[in-house]
Image (cartoon, grey):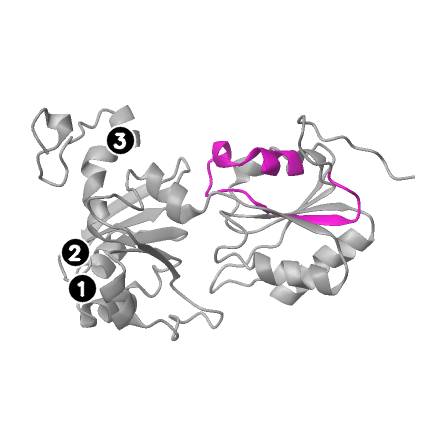
Amino acid sequence: MEEVRPAPFPGLPVFEPGSVWLVGAGPGDPGLMTLHAVNALAQADHVVYDALVDPSVLEYARAGAVVEYAGKRGGKPSPKQRDISLKLVELARAGSRVCRLKGGDPLIFGRGGEEALTLVAHNVPFRIVPGVTAGVGGLAYAGIPSTHRDINHAVTFLTGHDQTGLTPSSIDWQALARGSPVIVMYMAIKHLEKIAGELLAAGRGPEEPVAVVSEATTSRQRVLETSLGRAAADCAAAGMEPPALVVLGEVVRLRQGLDWLGALSGRRLDPDPLGRETPATGRTA
């Protein structure tokens, strides 16, 4: 008879044996996990986690749960995606409550959709638990908003490489450069010189501000502020390492006023980082 394991949080779902939950762990800081994610970890028999899950998040796994690494990192030996997906099927068919734990959100550049379709093909019940994606949460921890009404009414998320490991060939750089004032790039450091070149050729200015946020929301977070024309060289000189986000656009200038983590360490913030008169200065906007 299967063990009945009630959900530890009132009103949240019970993790049924023989099912898989595809869970977003957020960008790193365990405080950014949702209650559904914590609830999943508290009940799971088997946690299969990827390379972008911060170790501190794993401390929330149930005592006695099997915690297994199945990460994929570019340029390093990694399990094949098909093998990972079939492992989830195998564990569920053995009666386990399987938590597939993924950094950020499982459906944003996270292959959660591929894994879910494999589960569907094998008649394995599943649940998708969204998470805070790095392109939003990571930028917020760097003091950079994804949108600001004085700057942009659109934002684009893109990946710096496709399934071949190369810069995506399907991106229309001309349309992207014209149509998106703010571009947030995941996994873009390796190909940053080429990506910057494409955007410059498409008309973006070399002095347009860029920020690179490495290991966002963790105690190891580093932020580099530069420009599109210098981004690749400055990134290399500073030794910025993945996982990292790259954001292009005028919103980067707002970090001078919104770097709340820096303020906790004594940084003096600028109430008018865009160089405009604002209500915060006591003057008319």
Percent x, y of residue 175: 28, 70
Distance in Å between CA atoms under marks 2 and 1 = 7 Å
Q: Amino acid at mark 1?
A: Arg
Q: Are marks 2 and 1 in contact (CB under 8 Å)?
A: yes
Look at 77% across and 57% down and name the residue there. 90
Q: Which residue is mark 3?
A: 262
Q: Quadrant of the N terminus?
A: top right
Q: Is residue 122 above or below residue 259?
A: below
Which residue is at the front of the view, 101 or 250?
Answer: 250
Among the 4 quarters of the image, the one containing residue 200: bottom left
Q: Residue at x 35, y 47 (%)?
A: 214
Q: Which mark is residue 153?
A: none
How much space separates mark 3 and mark 1, taking CA atoms? 29 Å
> Disc 2 designates what residue?
208
Q: Nearer the viewer, residue 240 or 25?
A: 25
Using a 10 Å C-alpha cutoff, classify the residue at mark 1 as few (fewer than 14 neighbours), some (14 to 19) or many (20 or more): many
Whether 22 is among the magenta residues is yes
234 with respect to 8 (left or right): left
Residue 204 is tagged as: 1
Rounded to the nearest angstrom, the CA distance separating label 3 from label 2 is: 23 Å
Earlier residue among tags 3 and 1: 1
How many C-alpha atoms fall within 10 Å of the one at disc 2: few (<14), some, or many (≥20)?
A: some
Residue 196 appears anywhere in the view: no
Find out whether residue 128 is within the magenta segment: no
Residue 6 pos. (x, y %): 76, 30
| Type of the residue with mark 3 | Gly
State the SS at label 1: loop
Describe residue 144's horizontal placement relative to residue 4 as left or right: left
The magenta-colored residue range is 15-40
Q: Pick the residue in front: 52 or 111.
A: 111
